[in-house]
Each structure stands twice: as C-alpha cells, then as structure tokens.
Image (cartoon, rainbow, N blue to C red):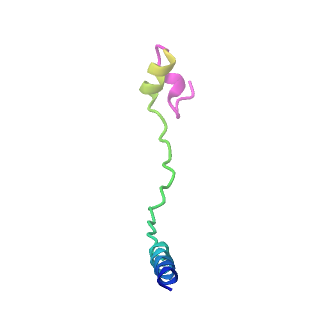
Amino acid sequence: MRNLFGIALFALFTASLTACSVRVNAPRRTAVKAKPLPPGQAKKITGEKSARRHAPGHNK
C-alpha cells in the first residue's frame, strides 16, 4: 500500500511538472531591403576609375 501511494505521488508530481511549459514568442524579423550602393562605392568595388557607369541617371 505504501509503495502504491509513493508511485501515485511520484506520477502526480511528474505530471504537474510536465504540464508547466514556457512559451516564448520572439518577434519576427522582417527582411531588410538592401539599399543600392552609391556610384562611388560601386566604383571602388569594381576597381574602375570612373563612377559614370554606376550612376543610375547617367546615360552618356
């Protein structure tokens, strides 16, 4: 009888611990739009001497 009471008490204690769960809702991260590089920075990356090819409105 004592052993059965101990098992029942242990099962009740275990069930009470497993019923407690912590949920963490992390905020969703939104994708950040990549900004276009300035013409001078693009010139440095490509190694060109002029930034004309990288300027968006330059058609010469």
Residue that sits furthest to the bottom in the current view: 1
Residue placed at 57% from the left, 28% from the top? Answer: 59
The chief SS type of the magenta part is loop
Residue 39 position, x and y percent, is 46, 28
Residue range highlighted in magenta = 48-60
- Between residues 23 and 39, which one lies in front from this camera angle? 23
Q: Is residue 52 magenta?
A: yes
Query: Does residue 54 sit above or below 15 in this rendering?
Result: above
Query: What x and y, as percent, mark residue 21?
Result: 46, 71
**How many numbered circles does the render carry?**
0
Q: Is residue 2 magenta?
A: no
In the image, what residue occupies the spot 51% across and 86% down? 1
Give the camera-side residue of 1 and 57.
Answer: 1
- Which image quarter: residue 24? bottom left
- Image coordinates of residue 60 in percent, x first then y, are 56, 24
Q: As displayed, is residue 54 above or below residue 24?
A: above
| Residue 40 position in % (x across, y down) | 42, 25
Give the answer, above or below, for where 46 lies relative to 55: above
Observer-nearest residue: 11 or 7? Answer: 7
The residue depicted at 50 percent of the width and 42 percent of the height is: 34
Residue at the outermost front position = 1
Q: Is residue 29 above or below residue 34?
A: below
Between 14 and 52, the residue placed more toward the observer is 14
